[in-house]
Image: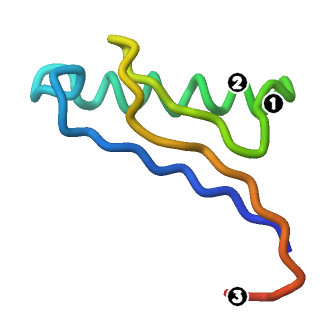
Amino acid sequence: MSSVNIKFNADNAAFDEENRNFEVSRILSKLASDIERGLLDESTIIRDVNGNTIGLCEFFSSDLDEC
């Protein structure tokens, strides 16, 4: 079984009330594009629009069915 874990912290200025939806959408769109083009490593740092490190996108392979 393979899995993908995308986790990021949205507790900074890039995610203020006016920009929250846009910034989340921007991050997820970029991740989707990078995944499609094969540009991500097994563990990739996620950065907000201001360049701050806010989380990770990680790919896992396992012999266990956890669902």
Given contact means CB atoms under 8 Å apart, are the residues at marks 1 and 2 in contact? yes
Residue 12: quadrant of the picture: top left
Residue 2: quadrant of the picture: bottom right
Looking at the picture, the colour scheme in use is rainbow
Q: Disc 2 or disc 3, which is closer to the eye? A: 3
Residue located 23% across and 29% down the image: 20
The amino acid on which the numbered mark 3 sits, given as a three-letter code, is Glu
Q: Earlier in the sequence, mark 1 or mark 3?
A: 1
The amino acid on which the numbered mark 1 sits, given as a three-letter code, is Glu
Quarter of the image containing the N terminus?
bottom right
Number of numbered labels in the structure image:
3
Residue 65: quadrant of the picture: bottom right
Q: Label 1: which residue? A: 36
Asked if residue 59 lies left or right of residue 18, the reply is right
Residue located 45% across and 22% down the image: 26
Q: Which mark is residue 66?
A: 3
Neighbours of disc 3 within 10 Å: few (<14), some (14-19), many (20+): few
Neighbours of disc 1 within 10 Å: few (<14), some (14-19), many (20+): few
Give whichever of 5, 44 is nearer the camera: 44
Neighbours of disc 2 within 10 Å: few (<14), some (14-19), many (20+): few
Residue located 54% across and 43% down the image: 56
Give residue 50's position: percent from left, percent from top.
Answer: 33, 11
Asked if residue 57 lies left or right of residue 63, the reply is left
Q: Secondary structure at mark 2?
A: helix
Q: Secondary structure at mark 3?
A: loop
Q: Label 2: which residue? A: 33
